[in-house]
Amino acid sequence: MTAEAKAVTKPATATMTGPASPPLTERQEARRRRILHASAQLASRGGFDAVQMREVAELSQVALGTLYRYFPSKVHLLVATMQDQLQHMHSTLRKRPPAGEEPAERVAETLMRAFRALQREPHLADAMVRALTFADRSVSPEVDTVSRLTTAIILDAMGLEAPPTAEQLSAVRVIEHTWHSALITWLSGRASIAQVKIDIETVCRLIDLTAAEKA
Amino acid sequence: MTAEAKAVTKPATATMTGPASPPLTERQEARRRRILHASAQLASRGGFDAVQMREVAELSQVALGTLYRYFPSKVHLLVATMQDQLQHMHSTLRKRPPAGEEPAERVAETLMRAFRALQREPHLADAMVRALTFADRSVSPEVDTVSRLTTAIILDAMGLEAPPTAEQLSAVRVIEHTWHSALITWLSGRASIAQVKIDIETVCRLIDLTAAEKA
DNA sequence: ATCAAGTCTGAAACTTGTTCTACATTATCC
DNA sequence: GGATAATGTAGAACAAGTTTCAGACTTGAT
């Protein structure tokens, strides 16, 4: 039995998520933060398996029941952790925008930068990405948020002047698919870092394609 | 604790997998088949969660311990199930090759045909794809086999005269990434069937790209 | 200050994947 | 055909995600 319908009056995530969950008190915000921190910490050690709900609860000084009130399942927790990390990454990436001439180059450069960041904490990457792709319907809203964040990062990297065309949005979707799936193959040891690089560069050419067609 | 090192003298899969596992006796082959059948049957009902090891064991008339000897984890079992289904699909697809003019069209057509087949058993698709992307290193060989099968299907669809170039292989990899990830978004209700179609068609244009460059 | 509603805690219970054990059955080799 | 190793069986035991519950603590409104 999975954690389908839950959350009668959940605290919910604070960051621009959902129509309007009751704003968290300070102590609640602090708890939420402690939990996410504990989650990331355990994940950094041993990946998905090392994030054990009882341990997260203990490490973040919160009762197990409380943990489940904040995050209705392990997958919810890890997806939220990913949201958190992605936000960091987004602002980090913003600081030094990619240097390439073409949009395709810039996107590839940005994704490779993100990839290198993930390589520094491969276990954390494992936990987050596995949770993301394992998530079922009950986690859709949260996964969608992650997806929007990723899209934003890619669009940022493209550095468009005009709003993106439908074609370009399609290309971005495909890039995102490739990004996630390539990460999976890397994390499960079926593809090398070099191979992931090639895959990213290959898919980024789709962007050139949509640009070329305009001419 | 996941099922890392196991399989002291496992029966192993029969179909061209690995260097040489001891050939199964007839009764063993029959057991293996019963297990896979039970797995697919339960998966067709309720997806990943509905495939419960005890139930699979019972339904296939095998002791739990035996089930685990044949398939060292639930994920192994489901990935093997996918192998099995893919083989069916491969031979089915071979019968009526895609009709499109361009390789890109033919690949898109083939994948859409496969997609429609999956739509007929969405729960089964859920179980198999989720297992595939959730698989950790201990399942790498099996996942690799699935990947090779998928690659074969795509290359078949391309209908090349010459052996594929490195570029084309890269494109195929990216198509495969997109295929898996798009399926995931569909299965978790975050993308419509139409959207998956668009994604597939978009990524297949990469093939044209590699063809165009030769000229 | 006080009452009610909503939260948090600690601990036990339940579920399902996985492992282990003691014994029965089958296969293999002489 | 019989010894012996490999395989299969039943069932208990264990691990980790999830649920539940009774009671203590906060908070917000009166």
Image: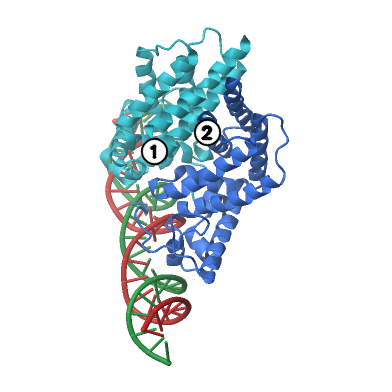
Chain colours: A blue, B cyan, C green, D red
- All told, the count of numbered labels is 2
Q: Residue at x 38, y 24 (%)?
A: B114
> Which image quarter is the C terminus of chain A in?
top right
Q: Which residue is mark 2?
A: A169
- The label number, if any, that marks residue B111 in the structure image: none
Does A173 appear above or below A202?
below
Q: Quadrant of residue B46?
A: top left
Q: Position of residue D21 (x, y in %)?
A: 31, 71
Q: Position of residue A117 (x, y in %)?
A: 66, 45
Q: Nearer the viewer, residue B58 or B187?
A: B187
Does A70 appear above or below B70?
below
Which chain does tag 2 point to?
A
Residue at the limit of the structure toward the front, as seen here: A162
Q: Nearer the viewer, residue A67 or B29?
A: A67
Q: Nearer the viewer, residue B158 or B56?
A: B158
Label 1: which secondary element: helix
Q: Nearer the viewer, residue B67 or D8?
A: B67
Same chain, marks 1 and 2? Answer: no
In space, the residues marked 1 and 2 are separated at their CA atoms by: 21 Å
Q: Quadrant of residue B61?
A: top left
- The label number, if any, that marks residue B187 in the structure image: 1
Tell whether label 2 touches label 1 (CB within 8 Å): no
Q: Is residue B49 left or right of residue A174?
A: left
Which chain does tag 1 point to?
B
Does residue B71 show up? no
Q: Position of residue B111 (x, y in %)?
A: 42, 23
Label 2: which secondary element: helix
Amino acid beneath label 2: Leu
Does A39 appear above or below C10?
above
Q: Is residue B93 left or right of residue A31?
A: left
Q: Position of residue B192 (x, y in %)?
A: 38, 35
